[in-house]
Image (cartoon, rainbow, N blue to C red):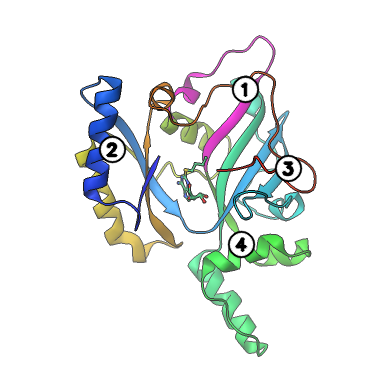
């Protein structure tokens, strides 16, 4: 995973691609490109098709259990038929956003009350997740994009579904289950040149988007290849280890 924002430029991407081709001995790498959403990062756990827990990324080491607030986000399904794909427990990463419209309304209301407006929608979204009033969370109309299945267990006798062999497939699976994943925004390309081209095109549309983005994220599409290249593991963990617990999230929770 690379994100093309301030931290990486075109030359870095070409360099990454060259190294990836060398390492994998492949002539061409297939990439999936999608926006890097600029909000508050969340992790969700679904157990037996039900949303069981949600946590924020916090400071990157420990996050907060925000299950009740997460359940106020209308674009996140409280239940989803993961069992149709043979999945029992699923951990999903995503980003909670306040769209530009809702942000403006929220700030206007603050100003009307004589309070200081918030600097940006990211702070508004991340801050809202932490408040202790679920009804107020609901009023603020947060939205969530989900972009990654970080872990899962299979139901007895089931095999890894075809959809979970690629990143694009997992986004499609999430979309089909009623999540808002970036299927409309993402593109799959063979080779890095088309990736760079799409990033530049998307950048031009940035101001027209209803939400803020912070660059683009470029992912090697095939999970086996990601593993071979030393990226994150996407295979079901031996004994399932929950990275979300009630209360504080353990210190090994990282993204
Ligand atoms: S991929 C296991 N994709 O950027 C996590 N991250 O990742 C894989 N972010 O704070 C991360 N949009 O919350 C990924 N489409 C996207 C993203 C995205 C926003 C955030 C993420 C994290 C940071 C670095």
* Magenta region includes residue 154: yes
Question: Which quadrant holds the N terminus?
Answer: top left
Is residue 9 or residue 41 the one in the foreground? 9
Left or right position of 27 against 140:
left
**Residue bearing the label numbered 1:** 237
Q: In the rendered image of this protein, does residue 159 appear above or below residue 106?
A: above
Left or right position of 204 against 103:
left
Sequence-earlier tag: 3 or 2: 2
Front disc: 3 or 2: 2
The image shows residue 125 at horizontal and vertical percentages of 59, 63
Quadrant position of residue 84: top right
**Residue bearing the label numbered 4:** 126
| Label 2, ligand 1: CB separation under 8 Å | no
SS label for mark 1? loop
Assess disc 2: are there few (<14), some (14-19) or many (≥20) residues with their C-alpha within 10 Å of its C-alpha: some
Q: In the rendered image of this protein, does residue 34 appear above or below residue 170?
A: below
Residue at screen point 74% across, 50% down: 65
The image shows residue 164 at horizontal and vertical percentages of 50, 25
SS label for mark 2? helix
Sequence-earlier tag: 4 or 3: 3
Residue 185 at least partly seen: no
Give the Cα separation between the discs numbered 4 and 2. Answer: 32 Å
**Residue bearing the label numbered 2:** 16
The image shows residue 33 at horizontal and vertical percentages of 35, 42
**Residue bearing the label numbered 3:** 53
| Label 1, ligand 1: CB separation under 8 Å | no
Q: Give, as a single range, the part of the protein colored magenta.
A: 147-166
Give the Cα separation between the discs numbered 3 and 1. Answer: 19 Å
């Amino acid at each position: 995973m690379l994100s093309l924002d301030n931290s990486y430029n075109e030359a870095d991407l070409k360099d990454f691609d060259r190294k990836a081709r060398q390492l994998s001995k492949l002539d061409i790498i297939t990439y999936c490109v999608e926006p890097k959403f600029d909000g508050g990062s969340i992790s969700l756990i679904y157990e037996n098709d039900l949303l069981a827990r949600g946590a924020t990324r916090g400071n990157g080491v420990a996050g907060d259990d925000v299950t009740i607030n997460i359940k106020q986000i209308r674009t996140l399904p409280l239940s989803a038929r993961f069992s149709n794909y043979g999945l029992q427990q699923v951990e999903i990463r995503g980003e909670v956003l306040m769209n530009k419209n809702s942000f403006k309304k929220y700030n206007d209301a603050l100003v009307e009350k004589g309070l200081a407006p918030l600097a940006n929608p990211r702070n508004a979204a991340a801050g809202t997740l932490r408040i202790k009033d679920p009804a107020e969370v609901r009023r603020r109309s947060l939205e969530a994009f989900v972009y990654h299945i970080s872990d899962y267990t299979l139901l007895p006798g089931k095999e890894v579904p075809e959809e979970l062999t690629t990143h694009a497939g997992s986004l499609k699976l999430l979309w089909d289950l009623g999540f808002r994943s970036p299927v409309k925004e993402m593109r799959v390309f063979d080779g890095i040149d088309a990736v760079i081209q799409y990033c530049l095109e998307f950048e031009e549309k940035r101001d027209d988007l209803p939400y803020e983005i912070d660059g683009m994220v470029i992912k090697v599409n095939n999970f086996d290849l990601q593993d071979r290249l030393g990226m994150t593991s996407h295979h079901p963990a031996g004994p399932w280890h929950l990275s979300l617990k009630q209360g504080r999230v353990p210190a090994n929770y990282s993204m």
